[in-house]
Amino acid sequence: MKNKSWLVIFLITVIVLSACGGKTPVSPTPGSSSPNTGSSSPSAPTPPAADQITLDFWYALSGGSGDAVKELVNRFNASQTGINVVAVYQGSYAEAIAKIDAAIAGNNVPNVVQVGAAPLLGSSEAILPITDFTQTDTSFQLDQIIPAFLDYNTAGGTLWSMPFNNSMPVLYYNKDLFTVAGLDPEAPPQNLDELLADAQKLTLDPDHTGTPSQWGLNFRDDTQWYLSSLFLENGGQIVSPDENQVLYNSPEAVAMLQLWGDWVTKYKVMPVNQHSEAQSDFLSGKLGMFIGSSALVTSLKAGASFNLGVAMFPAVGSSRVDPVGGGSLAIFSNKDARLVQASWEFVKYMVSKDSQIYLATQTGYLPIYKDAINWPEIQSLITTDPARKAAIQELQYAFAIPEFSALGDSDAALRKAVQQIELGASTPQKALDDAVTSVNQAIQRYK
């Protein structure tokens, strides 16, 4: 096995995901009044027949999303008699990765895992490339998957994992506050100019204290995701094609961080360094617009006491680029070819059209296929639940930030740059110069 640098890279990346948006939103399960936070106990398995193959499946989604995963596993088990999958919830992405590391070290891995940053496991030599299966299985058409989702699961030029639960950044807004502010609740902002104009009207400081009682705009705490979207939309780049250096101290990137700072210090439509409170402020009616993951839609709908609106992530001018987020399925290597083939059959089922429709309708995750927006079931979903339309529309603008070696370091460095600008501790150019220097050093260390 290669040196343990893969683990350092993987842990940093997944801890970032878990701390800043990798956690699954907890939403009430159908017919219940309290949320299901997940359980470490396995889903009740069907007693295996004597000749039945048993697969261990580890997953890292809780709440309503976790319930959807368990239901898909149950459906797979009921669909045939040769394979029985035992699904075990492993906690957050970071907790799951710690358990995966221990399992690899102890040579006691599961057969299939669902986790964030899965392609970085490829360097461990513990998982198998998905192309090992698709090159010989003509029943599965890899080219029908949205290219950005495949790119999101690729590291070092190899497709290591299968897209499963993917999300996009979207704009949530309080339609009731829009109406009170004299804004059209059916015409949310489409670009950054409109975003600022609406945020100014939504920001209220009636007592002129300098601390508004109602803010116009805020982002969830995975700020690097949204800042990266702005970089890309403005023509900037995240990393060089050879993945040897990050490139976001360019004029295009600096301009976007400058604007971010202006929202806080110049226009005063966004509070200073309060991204961890953004979601609760939004649900309590203290925030007019909230930018977060499409995966939050079910929990926000359940928690909102107002009319919830959802729009696409605002464009820079007319340019839209929406980075992909979420988790994937990976298959572990095994000397028993029957277990490996059974694992592939299970993965195929989990990403089948029917399974993707179920996951999309039960959660805020998005179907992975190019023609999904034309499926009758998805058309019905966005007709009956307009809050789902924006994220599905964004699929045409999906982009994958490369899974390069220092991605976790990069995310942390960008969040630090955001914090420095909001606190007035640095200039946009210096903050991004410092970020680029530290991340490029990390890239060299991981070689």
Image (tube, rainbow, N blue to C red):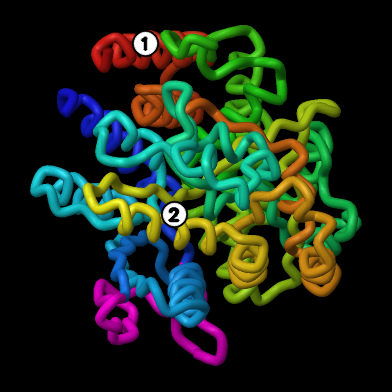
Q: Which residue is mark 1?
A: 440
Front in this rendered view, residue 124 or 441: 124
| Above-or-below relation of 269 to 318 | below
Residue under the image location 31 percent in, 65 percent down: 55
- Whether residue 45 is in magenta: the answer is yes
Q: Is residue 294 left or right of residue 13?
A: right
* Residue density around tag 1, few if under 14, some if 14–19, many if 20 or more, within 10 Å: many
Query: Mark 1 belongs to which amino acid?
Result: Asn
Element type where label 1 sits in the image? helix
- Residue 294 shown left or right of residue 341 in the figure: right
| Residue 130 rendering spot, x and y as whole percentages | 46, 41
- Secondary structure at badge 2 equals helix
Q: Quadrant of residue 147?
A: top right
The quarter of the image holding the N terminus is top left
Quarter of the image with the C terminus is top left
Q: Residue at x 26, y 17 (%)?
A: 446
- In the rendered image, residue 406, in percent from the top left (x then y), is placed at 36, 22
Mark 2–mark 1 Cα distance, whole angstroms, equals 37 Å
Q: Position of residue 256 (x, y in %)?
A: 64, 22
Question: In the rendered structure, which disc, 2 or 1, sits on the residue that comes first in sequence?
Answer: 2
Q: Which residues are magenta?
A: 26-51
Tag 2: residue type? Trp
Q: Residue at x 16, y 24 (%)?
A: 3
